[in-house]
Each structure stands twice: as C-alpha cells, then as structure tokens.
Amino acid sequence: MSNVFSAVLTIGRDAEVRYAPSGVAILTVTGANNTGYGDKKKTNWIRASVFGKRAEGELVNWLKKGVQIFVSGELNTNEYEKDGQTKTSLELNATIIDLVGKK
C-alpha cells in the first residue's frame, strides 16, 4: 500500500455484496465522515470495499444504515462528470472494517 487512510464512518445505506465477472465477491459500504466545526463543517462520503473471502462472510448483515464503523486501507480518488460538472468521489480499498458504535 502506498498510502493508508483511517476513519470512523457512519453508514449511509446498507452494505451490498456483488460479484465481479471473475467470480470474486466485492462488499461495498458507503459512509459519512464529518470534519471541521461550526460554519466550516463538511461531510465527506467515502465508499469502502473489501474483496474475496472477507466479502463473502456475515459482515454484510451487520453493516446497516446508521451504524458506525472504523475503516482503514488505501484511499483513491475517482473523477467523473455529472450534469456537465466534474465531480470527485473517495474510494477506499479497505483492509480493515470494524464495528465501533451502534445505531
């Protein structure tokens, strides 16, 4: 890993498991991380994914909207165009996803 990013996220929608054409399982969860305070407060949305055997387990049953999780892994940015504007999304190739809070 060239960079390591760690954060506590509040899940915005239930996690999903899908399968790549190669058959590899991919668990994806999106969560919010708040930074700043007062009028400088900002919410960053981060999509975290785990692959393979770890994605096939029971973890998906616990990753529900409103639950807090700790994530760590390699952070990447992805640029895309929507409605004529260039947007940036944050994507995390997670090595760790742990439950830290409750709904």
Image: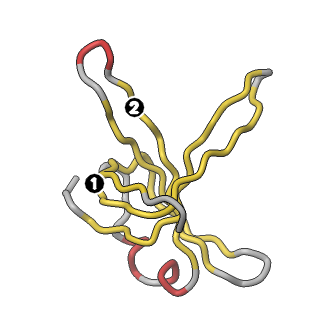
Relative side of 33 to 45, left or right? left
- Along the line of sight, the residue nearer the viewer: 24 or 61: 24
Of the two numbered discs 2 and 1 on the same chain, state the one appearing first in sequence: 2
Circle 1 residues within 10 Å: few <14, some 14–19, many ≥20: many
Q: Which mark is residue 43?
A: 2
Q: Estimate the x, y position of residue 100 in percent, counting from the top left.
A: 21, 61
Give the quadrant of residue 86: top right
- The reply to whether discs 2 and 1 touch (Cβ–Cβ < 8 Å) is no
In the image, what residue occupies the spot 24% across and 22% down? 37
Query: In which image quadrant can residue 32 be found?
Result: top left
Residue 4: quadrant of the picture: bottom left
How much space separates mark 2 and mark 1, taking CA atoms? 15 Å
Indicate which disc residue 28 carries: none
- Residue furthest out toward the bottom: 53
Residue 28 seen in render: no
Residue denoted by label 1 = 68
Describe the element under mark 2 as helix, strand or loop. Answer: strand
Coloring basis for residues: secondary structure
Q: Position of residue 41 (x, y in %)?
A: 32, 22
From where the camera sits, is residue 25 visible? Answer: yes
- Farthest-out residue, front: 2
The amino acid at mark 1 is Gln
Disc 2 marks a residue whose amino acid type is Thr
Q: Residue at x 52, y 71 (%)?
A: 50
Image x and y of residue 46, in percent: 48, 47
Seen in the picture, residue 83 relative to 66 is either above or below; the reply is: above
Horizontal relation, residue 12 to residue 10: left or right: right
